[in-house]
Each structure stands twice: as structure tokens, then as C-alpha cells.
């Protein structure tokens, strides 16, 4: 956020969005979560707006990163129950017979948080 990486635990320490396991984070210049059917179906939204469509976890020993990135983010999502993260692309309304493409990249590698941050800018 604002060019600085924050952990979900830091964000939840600042403000708990609710007791449910699923939390959406809005993304700067992204759609309003309430405008997305999934954002209406799961109403637990964190008030903090994230800067990019990127999220990752760091291994306990700090040697590995598993993360997701998307260039056109709709939201970043965290599931406390299943321990998963998403950075899902925004897909506008698709007309009948038309196609649209959204891409989310999955990154699993030996490296650092800084290495992952660089991948978010690619």
C-alpha cells in the first residue's frame, strides 16, 4: 500500500473487517467491490485499498515465495479458512458470442519478498 508492502496480519491489526474467513481488498483504480457479483455475495471487505494486484506468502524459513499477480486487478482476496490468496483480473461484461481474457500469474520460486515485488512491476 502506497508503495510499501504490508502483511495481512498488519492490516487486520489496524482494522478487522469481520469475523468471516473471506476478505476482499479493493485495488486502486479497480472496480467498486459492491459492483461485482462476488463482492455482493461475500460482503466482508477490508477498507484498505491495495496499490497493485499482487499477493504472496513467504515460507517459514524465508527462502521461498508463492504469489499471484495480475495486471488488471478486480481485487485481492484472502481466505483465512483455506489459507489461500487471489489476485483476480477484472473482466468487464462479456457480450453474447464475444470472448475476453484475464490472466493471473502464479509465482513459486526460491527468493525474497523484494524479488516478488519486482515481478509485480513486470
Image (spheres, grey):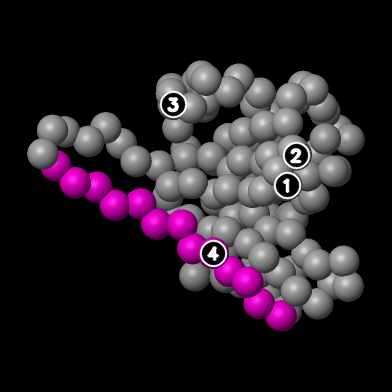
- Report the front residue among 37 and 1: 37
Q: Which residues are magenta?
A: 98-110
Mark 1–mark 2 CB contact (< 8 Å)? yes
Q: Is residue 113 above or below residue 20?
A: below
Q: Which residue is mark 2?
A: 80
Residue 105 shown in magenta: yes
Categorize mark 4 by other alpha carbons within 10 Å: few (<14), some (14-19), many (20+).
some
Q: CA distance from mark 3 to mark 4?
A: 23 Å
Counting residues from the start of the chain, the first of labels 1 and 3 encountered is 3
Q: CA distance from mark 1 to mark 4?
A: 15 Å
- Number of the front mark, 1 or 4: 1
Residue under label 3: 36
Q: CA distance from mark 2 to mark 4?
A: 19 Å
How far apart are labels 1 and 2 at the CA level? 5 Å
How many discs appear? 4
Q: Check disc 3 and report its element: helix, strand or loop.
A: loop
- Extreme-bottom residue of the structure: 110
Is 79 placed left or right of 101 in the picture?
right
Amino acid at each position: 500500500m502506497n508503495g510499501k508492502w504490508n502483511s495481512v496480519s498488519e492490516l487486520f491489526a489496524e482494522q478487522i473487517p469481520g469475523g468471516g474467513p473471506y476478505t476482499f481488498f479493493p485495488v486502486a483504480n479497480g472496480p467498486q467491490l459492491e459492483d461485482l457479483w462476488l463482492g455482493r455475495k461475500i460482503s466482508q471487505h477490508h477498507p484498505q485499498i491495495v496499490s497493485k494486484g499482487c499477493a504472496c506468502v513467504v515460507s517459514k524459513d524465508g527462502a521461498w515465495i508463492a504469489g499471484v499477480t495480475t495486471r488488471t486487478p478486480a481485487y485481492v482476496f484472502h481466505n483465512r479458512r483455506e489459507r489461500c490468496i487471489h489476485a483476480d483480473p477484472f473482466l468487464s461484461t462479456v457480450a453474447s458470442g464475444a470472448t475476453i481474457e484475464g490472466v493471473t500469474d502464479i509465482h513459486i520460486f526460491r527468493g525474497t519478498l523484494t524479488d516478488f515485488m519486482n515481478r509485480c512491476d513486470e
